[in-house]
Image (cartoon, helix red, strand yellow):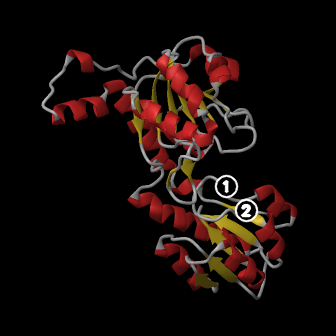
Amino acid sequence: MKRDSKKILLIDDSHSVLKEKLLSNGFTVDYHPEYTKQDIIEHIPNYDGLIVRSKIQIDREIIDKATNLVFIARSGAGMDSIDTEYAENKDIKCLNSPEGNRDAVGEHTLGLLLSLFNKINIADNQVRQGIWLREENRGLEIKGKTIGIIGYGNMGQAFAKRLSGFDCNVIAYDKYKTNYSDDYAKEVSLQEIFRYTDVLSLHVPLTQETHYMVDIEFINQFSKPFYLLNASRGKVVKLKDLILALKNSKVLGAGLDVLEYESMSLGRLTSPSPQAEEELQALFKIPNTVLSPHVAGWTIESYYKLADVLADKIIDCFKE
């Protein structure tokens, strides 16, 4: 879409390559990380594009005021901070850059698995206290295990690719794709995931359909105990049910980069109720878990690549 005006509002931190590329292609970029929701509502009619990350929910109220927007772009993969359906109904393109951090997510997810199987976090803590327990920290090998992946997009594929040297069986289920078997994973049904999986890795967006997808009913459909990895979104897994499954050994261990009570806007854990605080504290006491603060896609390299990929997509929006 060729337009004389190419004015963009950037409200979140991003690698400088994003702004540099846009400026060199004739865009005007106004950087206002201090903007509140009300500031955006006030100024958004003046802009052709909006670039965000996660601190402000781009909802219908903002979109209704965005009378000139060509696109809303997020420097990242997940789009749950944007009402994409409403925006697209108003002919506003919604862009993201999962290609930029898929390698980081693939590597981090593998790290979670290796830490769980080899009890690295437990052993590290013990050794620092002068405790030297070898038999108690005997690990497992990935070789020969069946790794089930739900969601075979950029992130799921990246994780499967990293598993290719471990001589394991990788199967994948994706409700919205077909004929995607490749050198790294075999396409299967959800029932086959339930039947064969030793390790389940989640790589799905947060939608109404995936919200609390992994609850006790879902977990109980697996034919054998399994390990759970989640580097997607916290609210895909119902924490209360996961804790129950960990305690009764239906889930043998969990590697979680995201948690249900994570605040996307503040980048921290929140305890909205006494029950939430109780669940978090219960999780923290379970030894066969590995936790990280939503950093699977957060590497030095991905910081650059997320911005670089997004800049190219924005530029392409104005070429047609």
Residue shown at 48% from the left, 49% from the top: 294
Name the foreground residue: 292 vs 200: 292
Describe residue 269's horizontal placement relative to residue 320 as left or right. Answer: left
- The quadrant of the rendering that contains the C terminus is bottom right
The extreme top residue here reads: 223
**Helix, strand or loop at mark 2:** strand
**Helix, strand or loop at mark 1:** loop
Describe residue 165's horizontal placement relative to residue 11 as left or right. Answer: left
Residue with the mark numbered 1: 79
Inspect the image, locate mark 1, and give the three-letter code of the amino acid beneath it: Met
The extreme right residue here reads: 89
Q: Quadrant of residue 93?
A: bottom right
Give x and y (percent) for residue 257: 47, 42
Residue shown at 21% from the left, 30% from the top: 126
Residue with the mark numbered 2: 94
Name the foreground residue: 19 vs 287: 287
Residue shown at 78% from the left, 82% from the top: 45
**In this rendering, the label closer to the viewer, 2 or 1:** 1
Name the foreground residue: 122 vs 300: 122
Reply above or below: 293 against 274.
below
Inspect the image, locate mark 2, and give the three-letter code of the amino acid beneath it: Cys
- The quadrant of the rendering that contains the N terminus is bottom right
Give x and y (percent) for residue 237: 60, 34
Q: Answer yes or no: do the residues labelled 2 and 1 have beta carbons within 8 Å?
A: yes
Give x and y (percent) for residue 73: 66, 66
